[in-house]
Image (spheres, coloured by chain):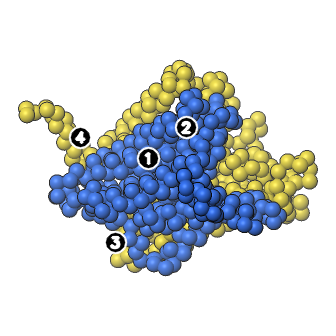
Amino acid sequence: MLHIKVTDRESISNKRSVMTLIVSLIAGMTAMGLIFLMSGANPFYAIFKIFSGSFGSRYGMMETITKAIPLILIGAGLAIAYRAKFWNIGAEGQLLAGAIAGTWVGLNWGPHLPSYLIVPLMFIFGFAGGAFWGAIPAVLKIRYSVNEVISTLMLNYICAEILMFLIVGPWKGKTKFGYPYTDDLPASAILSTITGTRIHYVTLLLGIITVIILGIVIYKTRFGYEVRVIGENTHAARYAGINFFKATVIIMVISGGVAGMAGIGEVAGLHHYLLYPGSVSSGYGFTAIIVAWLAKLNPFFVILSGLFFAGILVGGDAIQISLGLPAATVQVFNGTLLVFLIMGDYFLKNKITLKWAKG
Amino acid sequence: MEEIIISVAQRTLVAGTPLLLGTIGEILCERSGILNLGVEGVMSVGAVTAFIVTLATGNPWLGMMVAIMAGMLISIIHAFASITLQSNQVVSGLALTMIGLGVSGLLGKSYVGIPLPVKMNDWNVPLLSDIPYIGRIFFMQSPFFYMAIVLAVATWFVLTHTSLGIKIRSTGENPKATETQGINVSLVKYGCVIVGGGFSGMAGANLSISYSSSWIEGMTAGRGWIVIALTIFALWNPTRAVLGAFLFGGIFVLQYLLQPLGISPNLLGLLPYLATLLVLTAIGMRDSQKLAAPAWLGEPYKRGER
């Protein structure tokens, strides 16, 4: 009979972590290959196409970086929230809240202010909008023990409906021929891009700065230590005299705030006006969850995993066109990869020995 | 006026039925100690499979059966990850939702916008449906409504009055002690997650072959998440779930009722989600210390761990 013995691994080397990660990704892609096969596509061609579409050409590469901007910003913010085991699933809503607040500033003050004033103002308001939307579930959790998974999700739907209300109602543009969009932001409020690409470098730069700051906060400050203690051991955190309320609100102000910056970045850098919630957020708030997880909740690694998943998004667009697969394929891909990443964690933490024995 | 009241009451029950089905499934699952955040995805898979099978065979009952099986099948992903691999249940549930939403989009791509020629017909209960007012509200409903009520009562009975129910509850409360009684904790959990998935699949079928008779991507519209909130609202009790589900059904109907008053449909559209938040906050205000959630809810359990 085959005996399976599971024991805790005492120490985990970096090499083993990286190997596990690679094996998980390969296994996930194999599983995805099977799904491609079942949808009638050649799995090798489909997976090749995803990566050649995103990393195989200059255009693809530039698009990948463009889509990585919001993923890196949001992913870094989620990493800090998840470290404290605050399950913020509401980055979509926080992104939209930031987009709404930032666009309001851009539309109303933009015409009277030069770029070097209006752009920082828009990002500050974008941060504030997202931070406000993110702080609500933090307060609800600590004060009224409202499950944050539910509250952050509900706030996603609520913010999307508010945005819809604004663009079909009071904010509807006079120059948009009846479409539910706001008017274009004034020229001073539009972010410039690297020539020949859609990369709005101001937001990209903000993303990298965010990663560095959050990395330092997590690994080098007392607050970062508190975040880790809260996440790992609630009892210990209480003994250590950590102020739960304050810490949780700060964590969510950061997490929501950076998602808000991503939101106004998308509007001011790509769309130039406020439009349907689904088009503004493009599901980045959800994809960023896996980005943070793949990065092992390390803000620095978020840059790499953000680029990786941005690549999958761009490649996903490519296979939609060339293989006629629906947009949902990317979602299946992401979900499947996430499952295999979780499985990888299990094999990383536990040592499994198989043994043949009689009886 | 009379007509309006009857129609509102009747539609409230219609709108609450899928919520009730999903909530019973989640209660079962959470009672065994597993938090399943995959309901939204599983519901969506149920909706699309029920639609496809009903369209192909012309038999909505067959559609419903396949949806239940599909729901059970896809929930194994979460069961395996959270029980066998003891991984984080929040993350694995989210993965299930992503996969479920994605797979249903993939399967349903060529069915978007096709109207269903047959749907699950309403069933008038003989005699009872002749009772004035009450008959029209309660006894001229879709079979899903009657099944949901029966299943809610049955689940309540199993959980509170049978030895199986004791096994399930004690698994969620104290898996260690349960195991020493010689009960296979993992098996109980697997059973609850999978059967719970069947309920979600059925809720999805309710949406696509009875509530409306079409398939569109995203038609679950957050109901899977409301279900998880309702589970808390119901305090993990299936009979309280009946109350909660129809309360929320009422809020869905309220949207359409208030529309003629000139309120923006988008502001009305956020009512169910806002109500969910408010209800959870109200519960937390009343008793913020203890909601009497299963003690091991969401905690991975390792066999033989001390």
Q: Secondary structure at mark 3?
A: helix
Q: Disc 1: which chain?
A: B
- A5 left or right, relative to B155: left
Is mark 3 in CB contact (under 8 Å) with mark 2? no
The residue type indicated by label 1 comes to Gly
Q: Tell me if residue A235 comes above or below residue A219 in the rendering.
A: below
Residue depicted at x 39% and y 47%: B195
The residue to which callout 2 is attached is B60
Residue depicted at x 53% and y 65%: B244
Q: Disc 4: which chain?
A: A
The residue type indicated by label 3 comes to Ala
Residue depicted at x 20% and y 62%: B177
Marks 4 and 1, how far apart at CA: 30 Å
Residue A352, numbered circle: 4
| Residue A90 image point, x, y percent | 58, 58
The residue to which callout 3 is attached is A236
Q: Earlier in the sequence, mark 4 or mark 3?
A: 3
The residue type indicated by label 4 comes to Ile
Q: Nearer the viewer, residue A97 or B76?
A: B76
Is residue B45 at least partly visible in the picture? no
The residue type indicated by label 2 comes to Pro
- The reply to the same-chain question for discs 3 and 1 is no
Chain coloured yellow here: A
Q: Secondary structure at mark 1?
A: helix
| Residue B143 image point, x, y percent | 53, 48
Marks 3 and 1, how far apart at CA: 36 Å
- The reply to the same-chain question for discs 4 and 1 is no
Q: In the figure, residue A241 lies in which quadrant?
A: bottom left
Q: Nearer the viewer, residue A136 or B130?
A: B130
Q: Tell me if residue A278 comes above or below residue A233 in the rendering.
A: above
The residue to which callout 1 is attached is B197
